[in-house]
Image: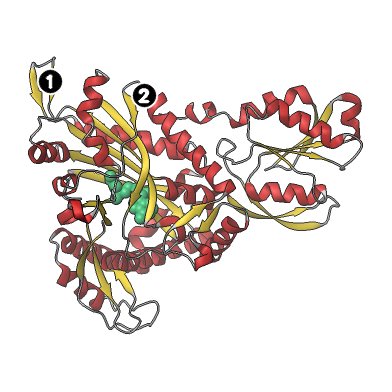
């Protein structure tokens, strides 16, 4: 059922110009996507919401735009050359390749789904009298599944932390996990696979240098930390925010734009005094969760997930997960990265990357708390939450299914569509006049084709919050009807009121006011 919704969402993204497969006319390129005319607007709005909430609202956070190409030693220092690996396993019959850790995580999710199913059933049966805590503690089926989950989870965490590839394979064998394609359990050994893409800079005759496409934007921030601190006269604690492309040669690149080989990240490194990092970690956890929840997609659809295995640089790490149609999955990571990166760059570059703290008259390498969110994953989250199919009356009162994207108006690609009722009698000219007066403030669209009902449906499908219809009365009294996407209600208003009505809903101020 939920998988069906996801398939529909993917088809919708293509049909309405949000996301296209890259190189489609050449049969596509795996896990690489292009954003269409509506997709790029939505993506830009998401980036603006993030950027302003970080840089504009925090006095001590500034921006940066560093290059994708960087000196190759950066990736040696950061640990990515040696440790940025995924454990992969092949099925010998289907020849399909999987991430061993993802196969086990999916097994854990299946057990969790069984528990959830029991709880949903019981909730229905007992109604208001239902006590979930008590039910979890006493129901035999839930207890048995919980025990299964706990055992598997602790065995899995240990295998990951010990980097024990043989044990990961043994878990897959013991859990009787089968290949979803061949259905067989004929598995190879588990091997490590480095995710960085490499290319060459300079011609071979000059001695080309092997460089990497950055797998995270964060390193561009670390290597510029002192430049920004000095030129901006920044005092600790302070943050540097950046939005940019990152590249990973993902093994399992399925689920549309959830896992891509070329994607975009919005990262912020917050530099703090050593010893205060865990307090800042908690603070940023709260701040970022409030950013997600300000979009009103339902607090119950978010949760924190502690990492099974800490990355080589972290002393604390948590994911913000959202309930996608295919289950709870990571949207953002919040990591306490200690002084690992700056210390490594100090060692490999031979340059001092210390901060002189005037309060204690000492220099030290700052600690770092990072917030890191994928633009594309956030895009998928916003679309998953906004996609609705509804049975509603059409303009003649007959029931009809409408597909509507209930996007937060601030993120909608088009804010207002202006439609002349007919293509004559001066109505198109009047409609264009309205667009001309509002196009400096809002992304407006003109639409005169097909019936008004069909035009409304087209606008619902791309999430346009306001449709304005120009009719004969408009030429007499300068009023139009404005139709609201979610309620489908219409009201007659003076043209001079449009700007105020729209601005009130699409301004990001409303979202910012909800942030902690
Ligand atoms: N600098 C830390 C870092 O890169 P990460 O957990 O590997 O941490 C952060 O990535 C975020 O980037 C993820 O939460 C996800 O939203 C996004 N991301 C990572 N890999 C991705 C991929 N292959 N496709 C799309 N988004 C991805």
The quarter of the displayed image where residue 248 is located? bottom left
Q: Is residue 410 above or below residue 40?
A: above
Foreground mark, 2 or 1? 1
Q: Is residue 407 left or right of residue 434?
A: left
The residue shown at (21%, 21%) is 230
Residues 81 and 146: in front is 81
Residues 248 and 311: in front is 248
- Can you see residue 309? no
The residue shown at (21%, 56%) is 204
Residue bearing mark 1: 356
Question: Secondary structure beneath disc 1?
Answer: strand
Q: Earlier in the sequence, mark 2 or mark 1?
A: 2
- Image marks 2 and 1: residues in contact by CB distance under 8 Å: no
Q: Which mark is residue 58?
A: 2
Q: Quadrant of the C terminus?
A: top left
- Can you see residue 146? yes
Q: Is residue 50 left or right of residue 476?
A: left
Q: Is residue 270 left or right of residue 113?
A: left
Residue 393, position in %: x, y?
Answer: 79, 52
Residue 485, position in %: x, y?
Answer: 69, 42
């Amino acid at each position: 059922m939920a998988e069906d919704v996801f398939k529909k969402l993917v088809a919708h993204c293509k049909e309405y110009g949000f996301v296209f497969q890259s190189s489609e006319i050449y049969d596509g390129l795996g896990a690489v996507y292009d954003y269409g005319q509506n997709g790029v607007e939505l993506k830009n709005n998401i980036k603006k919401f993030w950027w302003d909430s970080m840089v504009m609202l925090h006095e001590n956070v500034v921006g940066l735009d560093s290059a994708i190409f960087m000196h190759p030693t950066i990736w040696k220092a950061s640990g990515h050359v040696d440790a940025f690996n995924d454990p992969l396993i092949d099925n010998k019959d289907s020849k399909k390749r999987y991430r061993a850790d993802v196969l086990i995580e999916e097994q854990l999710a299946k057990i969790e789904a069984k528990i959830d199913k029991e709880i949903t059933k019981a909730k229905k049966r007992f109604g208001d009298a239902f006590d979930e805590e008590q039910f979890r503690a006493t129901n035999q089926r839930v207890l048995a599944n919980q025990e299964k989950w706990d055992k598997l989870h602790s065995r899995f965490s240990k295998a990951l932390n010990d980097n024990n590839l043989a044990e990961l394979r043994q878990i897959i064998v013991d859990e009787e996990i089968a290949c979803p394609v061949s259905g067989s359990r004929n598995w190879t050994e588990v091997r490590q696979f480095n995710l960085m893409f490499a290319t060459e800079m300079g011609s071979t005759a000059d001695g080309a240098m092997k460089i990497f496409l950055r797998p995270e934007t964060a390193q561009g921030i670390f290597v510029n930390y002192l430049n920004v601190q000095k030129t901006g006269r920044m005092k600790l604690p302070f943050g540097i925010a950046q939005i940019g492309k990152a590249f990973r040669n993902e093994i399992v690149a399925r689920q549309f734009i959830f896992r891509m080989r070329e994607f975009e990240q919005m990262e912020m490194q917050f530099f703090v005094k050593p010893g205060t990092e865990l307090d800042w970690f908690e603070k940023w956890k709260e701040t970022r969760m409030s950013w997600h929840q300000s979009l009103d997609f339902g607090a119950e659809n978010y949760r924190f997930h502690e990492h099974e295995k800490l990355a080589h640089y972290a002393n604390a790490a948590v994911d913000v997960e959202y309930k996608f149609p295919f289950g709870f999955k990571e949207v953002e990571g919040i990591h306490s990265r200690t002084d690992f990166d700056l210390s490594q760059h100090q060692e490999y570059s031979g340059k001092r990357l210390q901060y002189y703290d005037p309060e204690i008259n000492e220099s030290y390498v700052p600690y770092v708390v990072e917030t890191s969110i994928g633009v594309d994953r956030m895009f998928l989250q916003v679309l998953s939450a906004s996609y609705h199919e509804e049975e509603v009356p059409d303009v003649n009162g007959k029931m009809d299914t409408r597909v509507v994207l209930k996007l937060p108006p601030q993120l909608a690609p088009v804010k207002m569509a202006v439609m002349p009722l007919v293509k004559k009698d001066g109505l198109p000219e009047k409609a264009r006049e309205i667009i001309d007066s509002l196009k400096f403030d809002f992304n407006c669209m003109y639409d005169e084709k097909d019936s008004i009902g069909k035009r409304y449906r087209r606008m619902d499908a791309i999430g346009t919050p306001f449709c304005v219809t120009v009719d004969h009365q408009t030429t007499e009294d300068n009023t139009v009807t404005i139709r609201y996407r979610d309620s489908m209600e219409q009201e007659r208003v003076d043209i001079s009121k449009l700007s105020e009505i729209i601005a009130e809903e699409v301004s990001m101020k409303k979202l910012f006011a909800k942030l902690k």
